[in-house]
């Protein structure tokens, strides 16, 4: 085995607005922990148009981009730093394919040998797919910084605090 595999790795997982508003947060967190990940940091936040566009910048020329930004700003998201060995690829396997309809039919083989995926559980279609996962170690590094080092927007909790 390569040396890289001996150490733990971190990835950015996110429960998207449909997952949070559909009350899937606790169930998803149970699946995460049962699958051997540690949730080392988490942040509930409301993305605005600018931050959602920046997060998905790689898709800015795609026809689905405006819809994606509307979707991602439609309610709070829960960003999480997930840690385990091979966290990036294992989390991608656990969330399943982009199209939640395919996730429901195909039962993708992940490296965790799950017979289900989170998108099969709570996703709806190719856009409203409930969760996000970094697609590479370099994306993971960028995305963890995005939510946990850059101040992308105020946390929900601080908004509520401000309004008291
Ligand atoms: P994610 O980045 O959110 O983890 O999803 P992914 O890698 O599986 O898929 P990606 O190609 O990166 O697309 C990002 C998100 O854009 C929305 N999308 N809509 N209407 C469409 O055809 C379409 N295609 C993609 C989805 O919300 C997807 O997760
Ligand atoms: Mg992606």
Image: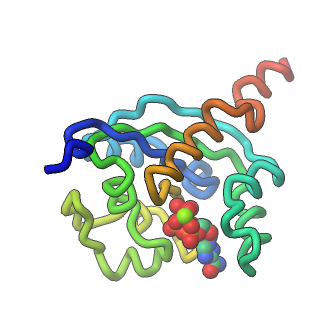
**91 relative to 110 in the view: left or right:** right
**Color encoding of the figure:** rainbow
**21 relative to 111 in the view: left or right:** right
**88 relative to 151 in the view: left or right:** left
Question: Taking 11 as reference, is 22 above or below it?
Answer: below
- Which image quarter: residue 120? bottom left
Pick the front one: 162 or 139? 139
Which percent across, then down, holds residue 103?
A: 39, 74
Which residue is painted at 42% across and 81% down in the image?
102
Which percent across, then down, holds residue 47?
A: 74, 46
| Residue 34 in sight | no
Name the residue at the front extreme: 3
Q: Quadrant of the C terminus?
A: top right
> In which of the image's four quarters is ligand 2 placed?
bottom right
Name the residue at the left extreme: 1
Which percent across, then down, holds residue 104?
A: 38, 76
Pick the front one: 124 or 73? 73
**How many labels, in total?**
0
- Which image quarter: residue 97? bottom left
Which residue is painted at 58% across and 48% down in the image?
20
Which residue is painted at 64% across and 53% down in the image?
17
Name the residue at the right extreme: 163
| Residue 92 in sight | yes
- Which image quarter: residue 45? top right
């Amino acid at each position: 085995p390569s040396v890289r595999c001996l150490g733990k790795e971190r990835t950015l997982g996110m429960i998207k607005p449909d997952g949070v508003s559909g009350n899937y947060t606790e169930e998803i967190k149970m699946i995460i922990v049962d699958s051997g990940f540690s949730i080392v940091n988490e942040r509930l936040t409301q993305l605005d148009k600018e931050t959602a566009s920046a997060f998905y910048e790689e898709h800015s020329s795609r026809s689905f981009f405006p819809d994606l930004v509307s979707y991602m700003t439609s309610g709070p998201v829960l960003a999480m730093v997930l840690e385990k060995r091979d966290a990036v690829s294992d989390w991608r396997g656990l969330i399943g394919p982009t199209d939640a309809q395919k996730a429901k039919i195909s039962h993708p083989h992940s490296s965790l040998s799950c017979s289900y995926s989170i998108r099969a559980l709570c996703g709806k279609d190719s856009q409203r797919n409930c969760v996000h996962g970094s697609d590479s170690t370099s994306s993971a590094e960028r995305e963890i910084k995005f939510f946990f080092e850059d101040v992308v927007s105020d946390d929900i909790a601080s908004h509520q605090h401000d309004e008291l």
